[in-house]
Amino acid sequence: MAKVRAGHAHRFRHTFAKELLLAGVPIERVSVLLGHSSTRITEGHYSAWVRARQEQLEADVRASWALESGLPSLEPGTYRARGKTELVN
């Protein structure tokens, strides 16, 4: 009725879950809000959007780059190119 392209209930359900996880809401709470019988179901569908998981993966990548390059580890949100450290989104 709203003429939302490809609009269906699960599209909005997925958006709801992803936004909660990106906002830092624990996956256990999101699981309850979605009505899942187990957090394993929620993890199977939405683990890529768990903020702590994303931050840990980014830290792991930064650490591996620092080891390979011999450069000191950088603060989150920065990168080094051509000898200059710059802030990124």
Image (spheres, rainbow, N blue to C red):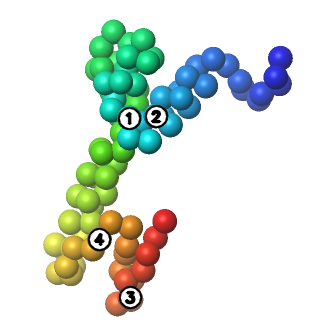
**Neighbour class for label 2 at 10 Å: few (<14), some, many (≥20)?**
some
Residue under the image location 58 percent in, 19 percent down: 10
Q: How much space separates mark 1 and mark 4, taking CA atoms?
A: 24 Å
Q: Regarding mark 3 in the picture, which secondary structure is present there?
A: strand
Q: Nearer the viewer, residue 6 or 73?
A: 73
Quarter of the rendering containing residue 21: top left
Kindly identify which residue carries mark 1. 25
Distance CA(mark 2)–CA(mark 1): 5 Å
Among numbered discs 2 and 4, the one appearing first in the sequence: 2
Q: Residue 63 sits in which quadrant? A: bottom left
Image coordinates for residue 64, horizontal then vertical, percent: 20, 65
Name the residue: 71% across, 24% down.
7
Please name the amino acid that badge 4 sits on: Glu
Kindly identify the amino acid type of the residue bearing the numbered disc 2.
Answer: Leu
* Distance CA(mark 2)–CA(mark 4): 25 Å
Q: Secondary structure at mark 2?
A: helix
Question: Does the residue at mark 2 contact the one at mark 1 (Cβ under 8 Å)?
Answer: yes
> In the visual, does 57 lie left or right of 86?
left
The residue beneath circle 3 is: 84
Residue 81 x/y as whole percent? 39, 83
Visible in this render: residue 49? no
User: Residue 42 at x, y = what percent?
Assistant: 36, 23
